[in-house]
Image: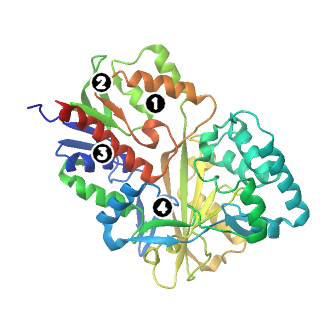
Amino acid sequence: MVPLPHICVLGGGPAGLAVGWSARRRGLPFTLFEASDRVGGNCATFASGEFRYDSGAHRLHDRDSEVTAEIKRLLGDDLRRIDVPSQIWDEGRLIRFPLSSAELLAHLGPARFGRAALEVARARLGGGGPPQTFEAFALRRYGRTIAERFLLDYSTKLWGAPAGELSPQVAGQRLSGLDLRTFISESIVGRSKHHVEGVFYYPRLGIGQISERLADECGRDAIHIGAPVTRLFHDERAIHAVEIAGRERRDADVVVSSLPLNRTLAMLDPPPPPEVQRLSSAIRYRQVRLAVLFIDRPSLTQAATVYFPHRRFPFTRISEPRNRSPEMAPAGKTSLLAEIPCHEDDELWRADDETVIDVVRAQVVAIGWVRPEEILGGAAHRLTNAYPVLDARCASAVEGISRYLAGFANLRMVGRSGRFVYGWVHDMIRMGVDTVAEIAEPRRDG
C-alpha cells in the first residue's frame, strides 16, 4: 500500500484552508502554518464592540456551483443570498455598477451619452487583435468618454500603476456586462438582468465566517497560528523540510504554499540561481489600508459597495457592512468601510491609524454622507499583499519563477498571492480543492 503523504500547508487564507479541508475529507494528513494570530488571511472579519466589518468588500459569488454548495453545507442558514447592487460615485451622484446604458443616459445627458455611444460603436467595430493593456481593453469595450471617467483613474489608484502598463487581466470578469448590444438596448428598455455585483452570498456574521468554518473542518489541532515559515530546504528536486520561526524544522512530503510568489522564492535554501532571483524585482503586491467609521444613524446608502473612480479620493471603494447583513452593526447604527490601496513607501501606508481615519472622515463629511457629530469612532488596519500588481512587465517574470518552482516535484502554489492571479473567494477555494485532488491522484493510481 502506498503510504499517505503528509502535506505542509503554508498560509491560512481561503486557499490554504481549502487545502486542509479537502485533505482531511480525503484522509490525507496535513499541518497548516499561519504567521498571524488568526486564520483567514486577507479574507477575515474584525469586531469593535457591537460593530463587525470585513477586511474589504468581500462576498461569495455563485460562479462555482460545487463550491457554493459546499459553503452552504458548512454554514447552513448563516449563508444568505443577497440582492444589493453596487454603485459609482460621480459628480455627487450615485449610479449603478456595472454601468447600465439607461442610467448613463440619465446621468450624462443626451449629448455626452451620444458621444459615448458612438465611441463604443467605433471601438467595438474597429477590430484588431487582442488588447495588450488594460487601457486598450477599456477603450475598446467602453470608448474613451466612459473609460476615462469611470475606469482608468480607478485602476491606476487600485494597482498603483498607469492603466497603460496594466495587463487586461486586472479587469477580471467585472467589466463584462456592457457590450455594444446591451449598451444600445439598455438605453431603451433599461437594465434587463441582475449582475454578479448585485447578487451574491454572504455569511450572517461576515466573510470571516467562511474562513472560520473551513478551519473548524480542517481540525484546529492541525492549524498552527503564530507560526511563520522562514526557510524551505531542498535538494534541487524536492522540498524536504520547512523551517518555522527560524528555529523549528519540519520534514515535508508535499508542500502547498499560498505565500507570495517572491517570498516563497526567497525562502529557498539553497537559494535559486541568480537569474531566477533577479526575476523577483518585477513581482509587486499592492497593500491596503482599511479605515472604518462607526456611525450613529440607521443607514447611509442602499449599496453593497460604492466605487470612487476619481483621484481626489484616496480610497477606491466604500462599503456599508450592514447592507450585507444587519448583524454587522448594532440596532439603529451603521458603519462605513473604506479601502485605500498603497505601496509600502506611500505616506498613508506609513501613517498612524488616527491619521488614516481622519482622512476618510473628512472625505465622507465633505461629500455630505454624514455629519461630524454622527461619527462615534473608527478603526484602521493594514493588509499586506492584498493584490498582485498585474502589469505588463510581470508576466514573463511570473512565468519564469513559476517554471522554476514547478521543478520541485512536491511543491504546489495556490491562492491569489501564490499564483500571482486576480480572483475571488470561490476561485481560491477551488484552487485548494483541485490541488489536493492532484496530490491524491497518484496514490489512487498506485
Task: Identify the element where label 4 is drawn.
Answer: loop
- Kindly identify which numbered label has been placed on residue 262: 1
Q: Is residue 115 above or below residue 30?
A: below
Instruction: Answer with the quarter of the image where residue 330 lies.
Output: bottom left
Pointer 3 with pointer 4, Cβ within 8 A = no
Q: Disc 1 or 3, which lies upstream in sequence?
A: 3
- Kindly identify which numbered label has been placed on residue 19: 3
Nearer the observer, disc 1 or disc 4?
4
Front residue (pair 384, 97): 97
Task: Identify the element where label 3 is drawn.
Answer: helix
Q: CA distance from mark 1 to mark 4?
A: 28 Å
Q: CA distance from mark 2 to mark 1?
A: 19 Å
Task: Identify the element where label 1 is drawn.
Answer: helix
Q: CA distance from mark 3 to mark 4?
A: 20 Å
Q: Amino acid at mark 1?
A: Asn
- Kindly identify which numbered label has been placed on residue 409: 2
Q: Amino acid at mark 4?
A: Arg
Q: Label 3 neighbourhood size at 10 Å, few (<14), some (14-19), many (20+)?
A: many
The residue indicated by pointer 4 is 59
In what quadrant of the picture does the N terminus appear?
top left
Q: CA distance from mark 1 to mark 3?
A: 21 Å
Task: Identify the element where label 2 is drawn.
Answer: loop
Q: CA distance from mark 2 to mark 4?
A: 35 Å
- Please give left or right for residue 138 compared with residue 258 in the image: right
Q: Disc 2 or 4, which lies upstream in sequence?
A: 4
Q: Disc 2 or 1, which lies upstream in sequence?
A: 1
Q: CA distance from mark 2 to mark 3?
A: 18 Å
